[in-house]
Image: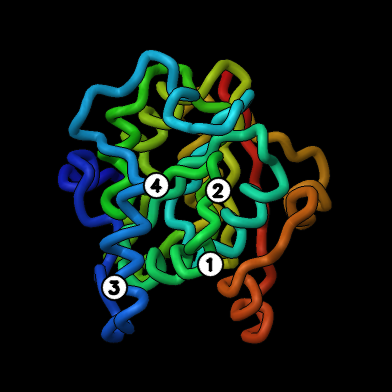
Amino acid sequence: MSDNPQHQAGKAFFGRRKGKPLRDRQSRNLAEVLPALAIDPESPAPDDLKSLFSANVDRLRLEIGFGGGEHLLHRVRENPRTGFIGIEPFVNSMAKLLGQVEGSEPDNLRLYDDDAVTVLDWLPAACLDQIDLLYPDPWPKRRHWKRRFVSKVNLDRFHRVLKPGGRFCFASDIDSYINWTLLHCRDHGGFAWQAHTAADWLTPYDNWPGTRYEAKARREGRSSAYLTFLKV
């Protein structure tokens, strides 16, 4: 399970960038709503990342690949004193989330619409309380496994930006990717898996809203695993 040099450079962990043509309103939201919420990794990161948010936040949390935004928006609304950065390179998914916040943009949410590696390398060290990687692209064909986001180099990135004791939460319905993640985190040495019994990793996270990917998996007869690691 070697790591691909391109992946180490932050390339090719996701597939296509755009699906069906956007409606006029979706295009307008991308042009007008997204800039108000977007972070700019080409500018220097602030010393205090909490200053990115107009809300008074106590914690900082990153979600990589939020899809349609069901989970991200649930957590944003549930935790008004947590600042969230959501990353999604797929244009249609970003447009879907923007349609749900249009006109009432949360003051504890910031967004980025490109490669998560760019943000991970931009963030200050030890700044995040939690990273969520939920139902990432599994790249199910063995020859594509090297394109999975979980890799030694990206775990190094996670370890750098998480606070001591910070959480890395991973959910998937693909057995090979679940095992891949467990092995990579074990071999990395900087993450302690928190499960003690099977129920610990088969039970969804607290106040879990579910996602469309999870619903699809269940319709197709696949169960999910919910892995929690702490930075050590």
User: For numbered disc 3, what is the local secondary structure?
Assistant: helix
- State how far apart marks 2 and 1 are (Cα): 11 Å
N-terminal of the pair, mark 1 or mark 4, is 4
N-terminal of the pair, mark 3 or mark 4, is 3
Label 4 near label 1: C-beta < 8 Å?
no
- Residue on which the image places disc 3: 27
Q: Is residue 94 left or right of residue 232?
A: left
Of 227 and 1, the residue lying toward us = 227
Please determine whether, in this image, residue 95 is positioned above or below residue 187: below
Q: Residue at x 49, y 24 (%)?
A: 50
N-terminal of the pair, mark 2 or mark 4, is 4
- Residue on which the image places disc 4: 37
User: For numbered disc 1, what is the local secondary structure?
Assistant: helix
Rendered image quadrant of residue 209: bottom right
Label 1 near label 2: C-beta < 8 Å?
no
- Residue on which the image places disc 2: 106
User: For numbered disc 4, what is the local secondary structure?
Assistant: helix
Q: Is residue 195 left or right of residue 104?
A: right
Picture disc at residue 153: none
Can residue 146 be seen in this snapshot? no
